Image: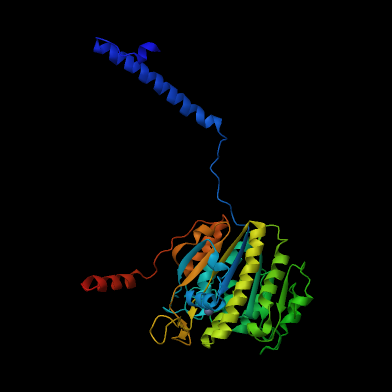
């Protein structure tokens, strides 16, 4: 080794040769080290991302960012879902209107098809579309629906029924009774089953011919039963202040039943009356509904944390009320709640996700892109492109901006 370290005298060729020898030695040593290193470490196989076995899809009807922020302002606390690790933005338009109703908004959230306002589970040409509940049922998962409105109301109906008019409640009730896709359903709207214009007692038919157990209250049910409906009120359920913890308790009940599903489950939960309260511009009612919905999300999150295989997705069909937070004196200090509408608005909503596949729910997406993401989180389908459905409209806006040098 000495001859490599010693500065050679005379012939520059010798210097070059010695340098080359030294370089080769270092290079071989380096290659050896590099070659050996990986074999000294445990081999890391590229890991497949975990797939969701169960999905809990919670929809706050009428709940955009203002409703969430209002609840945070009033309670002085975060919402359970505002702390979820992945959050995205959802454009809520329908195929017919820039402002969606709950039927078209729900159909998009359930099936990835935008339709005309008022239509349930069909595309604009009245062709039935497959919902995420139906697709996951086909894959062997059990399914449930828990709401605080009629079980036949637009949001729950879009997951199991196909009906051109959302107000055809008795047809929707009949479709629920006859479907094999729903294992359990909990909510109000009993009158659409036993006080019908066609005089049919659908509850008797469900129990005697169609394999259902039908209950009036959560307290009575046999949670091991594989097909049940809890119709807990003739009408919608009472307001949150009067119905107590019905919604979170119903979610707990549903999860106890679905927990035994051999291939996992899909559960849709709706905080139905956030929308009702915002239509009425009633902030106290809205706050009660928001906190009730958040409690339901907490029940879902607790289950997901315990199991580790459950995707929880929280979103909304649209904003209701045009809620905003001005200081009416204009001095930036006294935040008040102000409503600009008694109806729905076009404000985009947020989507919040936790669990396997939650990372898919970020960025700007359309209401018709969420089913594909849920299927993908379950390892069952590739993500569909979330393309802009009406590019002309965006181009027109851009052109206006370009032609105005002040913009
Ligand atoms: Zn709605």
At horizontal 36% and vertical 15% (from top left) the residue drawn is: 5
Residue farthest to the top?
Answer: 10
Q: Is residue 156 visible?
A: no
Q: Is residue 384 visible?
A: yes
Residue 277 left/right relative to 217: left
Q: In the picture provided, is 29 more to the left or to the right than 130?
A: left
Tell me: residue 385, above or below residue 26.
below
Q: Residue 57 in the image: x percent, y percent?
A: 59, 67
Q: Position of residue 274 (x, y in %)?
A: 56, 80
Question: Does 268 sit left or right of 97 as displayed?
Answer: right
Whether residue 335 is situated above or below residue 362 in the rendered picture: below
Q: Is 252 or 332 nearer to us in this picture?
A: 332
Q: Is residue 212 above or below residue 239?
A: above
* Depth check, front residue: 296 or 101: 296
In the rendered image, which quarter is residue 294 located in? bottom right
Quadrant, the N terminus:
top left
Query: x and y percent of residue 97 in the render?
Result: 42, 79
Q: Nearer the viewer, residue 109 or 166?
A: 109
In this view of the protein, which residue sits in the foreground, 78 or 98?
78
Instruction: Assign the C terminus to one quadrant of the image.
Output: bottom left
What's the residue at 40%, 23% (across, down)?
Answer: 27
């Amino acid at each position: 080794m000495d001859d490599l370290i010693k500065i050679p005298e005379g012939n520059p060729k010798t210097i070059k040769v010695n340098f080359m020898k030294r370089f080769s030695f270092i290079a071989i040593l380096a290659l050896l080290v590099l070659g050996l290193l990986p074999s000294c470490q445990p081999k890391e196989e590229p890991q497949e991302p975990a797939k969701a076995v169960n999905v809990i899809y919670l929809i706050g009807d009428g709940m955009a960012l203002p409703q969430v922020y209002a609840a945070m302002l009033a309670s002085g606390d975060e919402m359970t879902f505002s702390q979820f690790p992945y959050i995205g933005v959802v454009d809520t338009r329908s195929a017919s209107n820039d402002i969606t109703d709950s039927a078209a908004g729900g159909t998009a959230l359930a099936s990835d098809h935008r339709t005309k306002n008022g239509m349930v589970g069909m595309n604009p040409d009245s062709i039935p579309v497959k919902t995420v509940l139906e697709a996951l049922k086909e894959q062997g998962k059990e399914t449930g629906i828990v709401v605080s409105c009629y079980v036949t109301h637009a949001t729950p109906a879009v997951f199991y029924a196909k009906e051109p008019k959302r107000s055809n409640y008795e047809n929707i009730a009949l479709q629920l009774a006859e479907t094999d896709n729903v294992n359990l359903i909990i909510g109000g709207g009993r009158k659409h089953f036993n006080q019908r214009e066609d005089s049919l007692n659908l509850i008797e038919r469900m129990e005697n011919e169609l394999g259902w157990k039908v209950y009036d209250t959560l307290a009575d049910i046999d949670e091991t039963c594989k097909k049940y409906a809890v119709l807990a009120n003739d009408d919608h359920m009472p307001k949150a202040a009067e119905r107590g913890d019905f919604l979170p308790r119903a979610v707990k009940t549903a999860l106890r039943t679905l927990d035994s599903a051999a291939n996992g489950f899909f559960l849709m939960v709706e905080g139905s009356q956030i929308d009702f309260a915002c239509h009425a511009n009633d902030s106290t009612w809205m706050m009660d509904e928001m906190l009730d919905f958040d409690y339901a999300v907490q029940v879902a999150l607790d289950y997901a944390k315990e199991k580790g295989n459950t995707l929880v997705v929280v979103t909304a069909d649209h904003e209701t009320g045009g809620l905003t937070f001005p200081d009416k004196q204009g001095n930036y200090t006294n935040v008040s709640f102000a409503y600009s509408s008694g109806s729905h608005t076009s404000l985009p909503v947020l989507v919040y996700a936790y669990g396997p596949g939650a990372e898919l729910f970020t960025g700007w997406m359309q209401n018709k892109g969420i089913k594909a993401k849920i299927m993908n989180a379950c390892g069952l389908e590739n993500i569909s492109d979330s393309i802009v459905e009406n590019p002309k409209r965006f181009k027109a806006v851009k052109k206006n901006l370009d032609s105005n040098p002040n913009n």
